[in-house]
Image (cartoon, grey):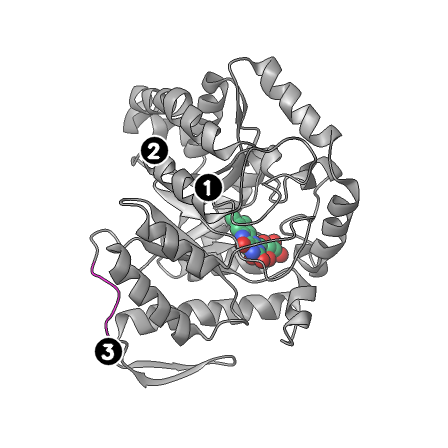
Amino acid sequence: MSVTPSTEPLKFAYWVPNVSGGLVTSTIEQRTDWGYEYNKKLARTAEDNGFEYALSQVRYMASYGADHQHESTSFSLALLLATERLKVIAAVHPGLWQPAVLAKWVATADHLSGGRVAVNVVSGWLKDEFTALGEPWLEHDERYRRSEEFIRVLREIWTSDSAEFRGDFYRIHGYDLKPKPLAVPGRAHPEIFQGGNSTAARRNGGRVSDWYFSNGEDYEGFSEQVAEVNAHAAEVGRTPRFGLNGFMIARDSEKEARETLREIIAKANTPAVEGFRAAVQQAGNSTGDKRGMWADSSFADLVQYNDGFRTQLIGTPEQIADRAIEYKRRGANLLLLGYLHFQEEVEYFGRHVLPIIREKEAALGGRELVTAAR
Ligand SMILES: Cc1cc2nc3c(=O)[nH]c(=O)nc-3n(C[C@H](O)[C@H](O)[C@H](O)COP(=O)(O)O)c2cc1C
């Protein structure tokens, strides 16, 4: 299936560092802080440097050496209230939230923020956190069946005055949420993102989500997902958008950027990375076809816990802009970015990388983008 790249400008999101230890499991210096004061300043910097979205992370207990973490929904709301234009995507686990309670939380957060809240539905890979909280740990594809119902319930409650749902996991009876989320041009309701790359995740991405997030991937791996998710979407008449994770190392010279990557991996916290590798076997690798996030990740890939090096947004601003445009051609609507030193590098991105991406987008124009995709 050929892809028609979006004629809209590429969008950018950054990972909210609400988890200690930064975005790489390495002892290399990371001038990033997981606390609120740092994050508040970062959010303001990001919205002034081309970022339309921020994505918070959810984790109820330590993994990959990240001992501390702020809760995603409350932290997201705090960032929304500290900013003016940034949309903040709060990560949530079906299985730990009752969907109507979350729908209600989102409606309030939406009113408080002027229609800027979104959710990222994450189906869960960390068995220990469900066990510690006394909640059942469902088999992989059952987790995704539950997530599909969860998303359907959210949409039903946000759009119906008498929400009804009869599922295997959730039941809703004539519920009228008041107030509903705000009416915002360009969206039917607060946007629903989905993390996960397994066969089941791709199906949910196409059938029910507004946005499908890919973990870090090379060109072919990303294109393969876009094609499969779009095929599921076509069956039900939906048109999801695509976000792609990438760890960005933009430096004045390619040599400097490559040396930074080398140092990150050389200083990997090996026991923490190995512990993470063991835990993520509960993701796509636990399924019959063994497809999904981390299913074929190398040790070096896992040092950035969302496979962010694979996207190769590493080099000079010019080199990175070329890759960003190629991903756009292949169907990306948004790049989700992580950094070593968030505050400084978000500013560097806005000053040096973004203008080149915009120039290249303008030079291409809609016609050439479509031709290039054939
Ligand atoms: C962009 C992105 C963000 C994610 N954020 C979280 C998160 O904050 N917390 C979490 O437990 N899992 C998170 N996940 C993991 C997924 O929910 C899921 O457990 C994982 O992708 C494995 O799915 P798979 O087996 O379908 O590949 C995220 C995944 C992606 C792609």
Disc 3 versus disc 1: distance between alpha carbons?
41 Å
The quarter of the image holding the C terminus is: top left
* Residue 210 quadrant: bottom left
Q: Residues within 10 Å of mark 2 (few under 14, many from 20)?
A: some
Which of the pair 335/292 is nearer the observer?
Answer: 335
- The residue singled out by tag 3 in the image is 161
Query: Residue at the location (72% across, 50% down)?
Result: 276
**Between disc 3 and disc 2, whose residue precedes?**
2
Which contiguous range is marked in magenta?
Answer: 178-183
Which of label 1 and label 2 is nearer to you? 1
Q: Position of residue 283 (x, y in %)?
A: 66, 57
- The residue singled out by tag 2 in the image is 50
Residue 38: numbered disc? 1
Q: Position of residue 26 (x, y in %)?
A: 69, 36
**Between disc 3 and disc 1, whose residue precedes?**
1
Q: Position of residue 282 (x, y in %)?
A: 70, 60
**Between disc 1 and disc 2, whose residue precedes?**
1
329 in relation to 234, above or below: above
Which of the pair 270/356 is nearer the observer?
Answer: 270
Q: Secondary structure at mark 3?
A: loop
Query: Residue at the location (68% across, 65% down)?
Result: 127
Query: What type is the residue that disc 2 sits on?
Result: Gly
Query: What type is the residue that disc 3 sits on?
Result: Asp
Q: Secondary structure at mark 2?
A: loop
